[in-house]
Amino acid sequence: MKNSFLIAAPSSNSGKTIVTLGLIKALRDKGLKIQAFKCGPDYIDPMHHAQVAGCPSYNLDLWMSNEEHVNDVFHANMQNADVGVVEGVMGLFDGAKRDKGSSAEIAQVLDIPVILVVNAAATAYSVAPLLYGFKNFNAKLKVKGVIFNRVSGESHYHFLKEAAEDAGVVPLGYVPKDERLSLESRHLGLSLTNNKGMMEAVVASAELINRYVDMDQLLSISPTEIKTLPAKENVARSSSLKFAIARDEAFNFMYPANVDVLKQLGEVIHFSPLYDADIPDCDVIWFPGGYPELYAEQLAANTKMLNAIRLFERRGGKLIAECGGMMYLGRSVELKDGSVYQMLGLFDYETSLKNMKLKLGYRSLEIEGNVFMGHEFHYSAITKDCYEKDEAISKSARGNKVDMPVYRTNNCWSSYFHIYLGQKEKMQSFIQLLKLKTK
């Protein structure tokens, strides 16, 4: 029997990310192999999970995919793990529509227990009705335990422990207030640029969790039945296509499930638009999202790479660009200070961060009879548009039309759309849409 649990909270900003990272490290320090997961479409938390757990963290999303796929991703990646740690998103019951697609629904689909993280900084016994409500709101959900965060000391915890016991939720311990646990925030989430500071916070979190949280009790209330799957064999790729994926500090938002499917279809190679002088031999270049604005000067200065990509496109090579990658394929990027850097110019649109405004949400995209699921999350905006827009229909989670253009030429696909293609049939439809020839 293995273990798994979902870390959730009554609301955002309860501290579930730093507690999750601390738990991953504390469990790994015990010699256990940890497999991390993240509810929802977020890229940043899974990247931190992967740094701490030592293996990719997979997204579980019931809006971008279905129950069967979520179960497949979970059980396939739990085969060689001892403990599965799933980090929730927002509040436990917050979904795209009511609780649809929420952390609660994912815990229910996977049939795993929920461990709440409650910010107790300004409360004591009053958490009893809160916990009671979360435990009893949905009888099919297994809210098993609670870890209190930002606790002032043992006396404070005594009130919280009594509240949990009276609400019927196992008090697993607490994490005291500690300045070391503050994680720097950036405009797209937790910092990816201050890795040293992030790891120091994680080490501090694990240290406190080892001291104040009953890890044995946590494991005792979270046994999970994992489906036994046949060992993976070297299955022949379905084509000889070669996919080159940009991966460095500027481009790094790529769903691991997308990469897994690409590996089934062909060969996957990684390269760096920041540091490399040329592109690898390939049929398709994929530019994921990321932080090109932080490295705009360096990207613009790497003229050998820019020229190599332009030549690749002129010779018929295919390019896919998502969000940050989309910015790179345009004519230029304007930064907050007004400075402008020239990019690839494969499309004539220009993007800017001068008047930063967040645009986010789930998106469905209908194009040529296909429907693709994903999300939009960016602060930059298109300041000069171009004519290479496709006839695509973008909708929100509630079915309302939204302005999220897709730019297409014979060889290029470019959009703010972060596309989820973890289901093989979806990836095959997308590749077909690009009119790629399988050799």
Image (tube, rainbow, N blue to C red):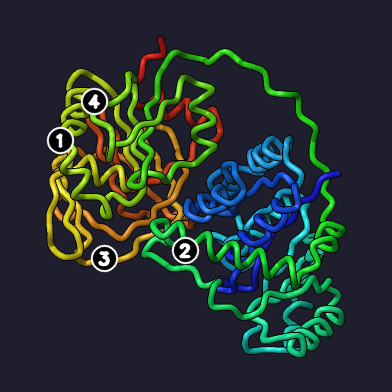
Query: Earlier along the polypeptide chain: callout 1 or callout 2?
Result: 2
From this view, report whether residue 292 is shown above or below residue 243. below
Of the numbered discs 2 and 4, the one sitting upstream in the chain is 2
Question: How dense is the environment of label 2, judged by Cα within 10 Å: few (below 14), some, or many (20 and up)?
Answer: some
C-alpha span from label 1 to label 2:
33 Å
Q: Residue at x 76, y 24 (%)?
A: 230
- Please name the residue that numbered disc 4 is placed on: 410
Mark 1 touching mark 2, by CB under 8 A? no
In percent of the image, x 85 and y 63: which residue is there?
217
Q: Residue 233: where, in percent of width, then height? A: 67, 18
Determine the secondary structure under disc 2: helix
Residue designated by label 2: 197
- Is there any visible trace of residue 104 in the rendered image? no
Q: Secondary structure at mark 4?
A: loop
Foreground tag (1 vs 4):
1
Q: What's the amino acid at mark 1?
A: Thr
Q: Amino acid at mark 3?
A: Met
Rounded to the nearest angstrom, the CA distance separating label 4 from label 3 is 31 Å
Q: Is residue 167 left or right of residue 397?
A: right
Picture disc at residue 303: 1
Q: Which residue is mark 3?
A: 356
Type of the residue with mark 4: Asn
Tally of numbered discs: 4
Within 10 Å of disc 1 (Cα), the crowding (few <14, some 14-19, many 20+) is some
